[in-house]
């Protein structure tokens, strides 16, 4: 599927509605007002916090995950949510949510009880349905599909002393080596950022040296495998000893996965590509912690082919010869979006089905099993572009962020 068609589909879908979180229920049998809540539900009665009891946390269906707190989009002065990430202050141990919205990035102190909305960094140019953020060395790096946006750099230590929240922040630096970008990836061990989906390098990854975060430096790019929608970059320490210690990029490139050695930024080396049957849109994936299995989500296959959430597993033990080893079929037809591995668990943003947590202990044998969930979009589980855009599971406290397109930020935690 071409990117422009995807943008049109998602742009239309973001203003639509959709989700009922009964795993076996695939019908749109509950009406809603476009937020994913029942249309007869008084917003004032929706709890900010609720334990998961008898399968529900307030109106939200759940399994083993409590609602710690939630913020609606109105609080952030926004009309749509998208990406999210987290930052832990190494000096104080405090944890912060970075919630991307259509017109900027909201910052929330989630260690405080209750959590505190500290303020927002406005978009560099225009509002957009697409904004992405990652963190390196106490700095946030933000890109957007908004025309002319570039990459904003924000010093997160400024969040330590916000005297009168919420504040209206400004960027500490802006990188202008590209205008719009779909996504940003950071390899913290190498201190390089990779913007993907820009108008440079044929849409392939655009390399940026961020060793000095306030002075980002262009460092080349890789155009060989065309447009890259998302990527993961690692300093490789997996089973393929031929590539030990190399910096490896795994690109999710619309209709295939691309594996590239980018150790020498001036001379990237394509190692291999792999595709699979019934490709809808090769969207995003993540390594298991031993860097053996790559778990991939295809964003459009549920719509195109009519099956339930499909998650694919690839054996990457030989980076020059990857192979598909299994597929997981979820309990609903909801579309899978972003997913990440922590320990033996795979945390998936499953759009209308919310956060889904899968046991990846046996991923090497092509097997995943659902072990928990929290549905931020109660109205239905349809294959539409509403609900959970991203999840962030890496806080030491065990708190997990869910950024919801329609309703805002959710902080949940395993019971």
Image (tube, helix red, strand yellow):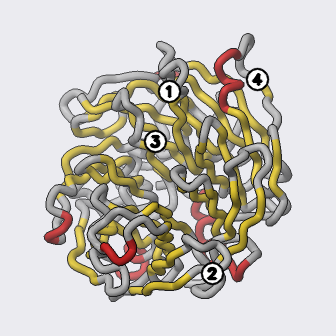
What is the x, y in percent for residue 274? 39, 86
Which residue sits at x=27%, y=74%? Answer: 317
Residue 334, placed above or below residue 118: below
Quarter in which the C terminus is drawn:
top left
Read off the residue under disc 4: 167
- The secondary element bearing badge 1 is classed as strand
Q: Earlier in the sequence, mark 3 or mark 1?
A: 1
Nearest to viewer (mark 4 / mark 1): 1
Q: CA separation, marks 4 and 1?
A: 18 Å
Q: CA separation, marks 1 and 2?
A: 38 Å
- The secondary element bearing badge 3 is classed as strand
What is the x, y in percent for residue 370? 20, 53
Whether tag 4 and tag 2 are in contact, CB under 8 A, the answer is: no
Read off the residue under disc 1: 95
Whether tag 4 and tag 1 are in contact, CB under 8 A, the answer is: no
Q: Earlier in the sequence, mark 1 or mark 2?
A: 1
Q: Is residue 19 left or right of residue 389?
A: left
What is the x, y in percent for residue 396? 37, 31
Read off the residue under disc 3: 402
Q: Earlier in the sequence, mark 4 or mark 3?
A: 4
Q: Earlier in the sequence, mark 4 or mark 1?
A: 1
The answer, for residue 188, to whether it is visible in the render is yes
Q: Earlier in the sequence, mark 2 or mark 3?
A: 2
Read off the residue under disc 2: 267
Q: CA separation, marks 3 and 1?
A: 15 Å
Residue 314 appears in which quarter of the rendering?
bottom left
- The secondary element bearing badge 4 is classed as strand
Q: Is residue 106 left or right of residue 94?
A: right
Q: Nearer the viewer, residue 328 or 163?
A: 163
């Amino acid at each position: 599927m071409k990117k422009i068609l995807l943008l049109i589909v998602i742009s239309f879908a973001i203003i639509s509605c959709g989700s009922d979180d009964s795993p076996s229920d695939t019908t749109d049998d509950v009406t809603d007002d476009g937020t994913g809540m029942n249309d007869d539900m008084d917003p004032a009665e929706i709890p900010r916090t609720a334990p998961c009891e008898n399968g529900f946390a307030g109106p939200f269906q759940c399994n083993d995950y409590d609602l710690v707190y939630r913020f609606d989009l109105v609080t952030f002065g926004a009309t749509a949510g998208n990406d999210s990430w987290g930052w832990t202050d190494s000096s104080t141990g405090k944890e912060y949510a970075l919630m991307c919205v259509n017109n900027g990035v909201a910052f929330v102190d989630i260690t405080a009880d209750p959590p505190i909305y500290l303020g927002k960094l406005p978009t560099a140019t225009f509002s957009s349905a697409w904004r992405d953020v990652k963190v390196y060395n106490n700095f946030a790096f933000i890109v957007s599909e908004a025309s002319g946006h570039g990459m904003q750099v924000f010093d997160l230590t400024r969040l330590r002393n916000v005297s009168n929240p919420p504040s209206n922040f400004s960027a500490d630096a802006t990188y202008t080596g590209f205008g719009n970008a779909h996504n940003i990836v950071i390899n913290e061990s190498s201190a390089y950022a990779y913007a993907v989906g820009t108008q440079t390098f044929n849409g392939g990854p655009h390399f940026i040296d961020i060793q000095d975060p306030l002075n980002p430096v262009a460092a080349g790019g890789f155009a060989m495998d065309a447009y890259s929608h998302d990527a993961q970059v690692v300093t490789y320490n997996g089973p393929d000893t031929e590539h030990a210690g190399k910096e490896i990029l795994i690109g999710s490139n619309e209709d295939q996965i691309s594996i590239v050695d980018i150790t020498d930024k001036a001379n990237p080396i394509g190692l291999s590509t792999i595709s699979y049957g019934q490709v809808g849109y090769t969207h995003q994936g993540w390594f298991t912690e031993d860097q053996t299995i790559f778990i991939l989500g295809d964003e459009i296959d549920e719509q195109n082919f009519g099956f339930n959430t499909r998650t694919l597993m690839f054996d990457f033990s030989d980076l020059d010869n990857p192979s598909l080893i299994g597929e997981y079929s979820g309990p609903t037809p909801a579309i899978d979006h972003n997913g990440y591995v922590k320990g033996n668990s795979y945390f998936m943003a499953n759009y209308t089905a919310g956060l889904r947590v899968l046991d990846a202990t046996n991923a090497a044998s092509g097997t995943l099993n659902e072990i928990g969930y929290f549905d931020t979009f109660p109205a239905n589980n349809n294959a539409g572009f509403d609900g959970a855009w991203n999840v962030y599971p890496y806080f030491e406290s065990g708190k997990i962020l869910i950024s919801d397109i329609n309703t805002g930020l959710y902080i949940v935690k395993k019971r």
